[in-house]
Image (cartoon, rainbow, N blue to C red):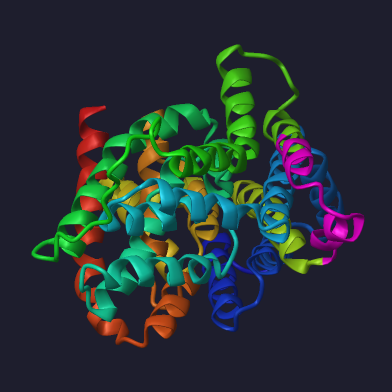
Amino acid sequence: MALIEPLVAFIVSIGLLLLLLYKRVNVGIALTATALLLAFLVLNWQTIPEFIYNTAIEPLTIAVVLATFGIMLLSQLYKETRVINSLSESAGNIIRNSKIVSSVLPAIIGLLPVAGGALMSAPLVDAQTEKIGLKPEKKAYVNVWFRHTIFPLYPLSQVLIITSALTGVAVTSIIVRQIPVVAAMIIIGFFIAFWRSSTQTKRAELTVEENPCLNTELKRFLVALSPIMATIVVVVGLSAARVNTGGLDVFSSTVLGMLVLIAIAKPSFSKLVKPLRKWEIYGVTLAAYGAFLLRNVAVAAGISEMVKTFAVNGNIDVLVVLAVVPAVLGFVTASPSSGVAISVPILLGMLTFSPASAALLYISAFLGYLIVPSHLCLVFTVDYFKCSMGKVYKYILPSFLVSLTAALLVYFLA
């Protein structure tokens, strides 16, 4: 028997989530604790253990949890073996335009979805943008903004995988609708960052064929990128061929990527197992389970139907909820996973998710998270470049508005 009204319980539970995230509690623990509190308030207590177990053994939950674990382990191995350094350094040596290098390198390092990844690209961006005379706040903007242009198109993005699983829409269908949005992000980023900046570039006098050094760097880049490319190609290939993997396509693909990485880097056993001793991997993996548990508890409590009734009686347009709610939740929770996990139960009673609506849900939560002041990438970058966060926001907020407008246009035209 419910202790309080389900909608009130849902609001109270979200309050707990906000408090935990404000206290910088791991998002996996925060999401799971929120789901358990909601279950405690709205479900029969005797059924809660069974509910937890049933969520854990759902094939989709298992697939997403394993995929998240595989992606995080691959990312940590890239970092431990320093192959990511080889990837970014070779890219910088191949591209001879400082503006392009400073925008591409953060995106490349963005392939590693790890907290603090922005600090890895900051020194590289600093060196390149110094050549074209950018101010510290613009350097910070370049590092943060371009780091995140890769995620809406990255098949190994944990948030993208969770969005796909919760909405029932294929990852590839969501990605296709993000292409125009990412194009808008890159265009506005280039315009804001480099307009009226110096045109100084590093010019190569020889072609790839004539320059053995450049040819060597190209090979180095391709070798360093091969574990990620192997993973992505297998994921996309299995999806396109409609091969039945029991939902384990991403996990099995990351295992292949790790084998390729091990073959390239030949790490020692201690270096190979070191990532397994890091809590970060398990915290992010727990977030995947927590998202499913929160969704299932909210659905069982009838939150979706209550919100639907409230929206109909209040004449609230579905598009407003679809675009605004995920963005606000992504912002206030400083977590795109939380924004998506909370939004899905709210929206389930109002619409049946299509590729267009799932894509808008994802990008809204993602953009809301991108601009939050407590976003670690932003915090670390501002600290590194010793600039005012307020000055960085002069560039980030217009970029956010342009990108969200592009997402809305894609939704209407899809």
Determine if the magenta segment contains residue 264: yes
**Furthest-left residue in view?**
196
Picture mark count: 0
302 vs 12, nearest the viewer = 12
Determine if the magenta segment contains residue 96: no
182 vs 343, nearest the viewer = 182
Q: Residue at x 53, y 67 (%)?
A: 120
Relative placement, left or right, of 52 versus 107 is right
316 relative to 130, above or below: above
Q: Residue at x 79, y 60 (%)?
A: 275
Q: Main secondary structure of the magenta part?
A: helix
Give the image location of residue 236, x and y in percent: 56, 24
178 relative to 333, above or below: above
96 vs 184, nearest the viewer = 96
The image quarter containing residue 31 is bottom right
Relative placement, left or right, of 278 versus 153 is right
Give the image location of residue 62, x and y in percent: 77, 40
**Furthest-right residue in view?**
269
Q: Residue at x 77, y 45 (%)?
A: 55
Relative placement, left or right, of 306 versus 86 is left
Specify whether residue 12 is in view.
yes
Task: Quadrant for the N terminus, please.
Answer: bottom right
**Furthest-top residue in view?**
241
Give the image location of residue 376, x and y in percent: 50, 73
115 relative to 202, above or below: below
Q: Residue at x 55, y 15 (%)?
A: 240
The image quarter containing residue 234 is top right
Magenta stretch bounds: 257-277
Specify whether residue 316 is in view.
no
Task: Quadrant for the C terminus, please.
Answer: top left
Give the image location of residue 12, x and y in percent: 56, 73
332 relative to 151, above or below: below
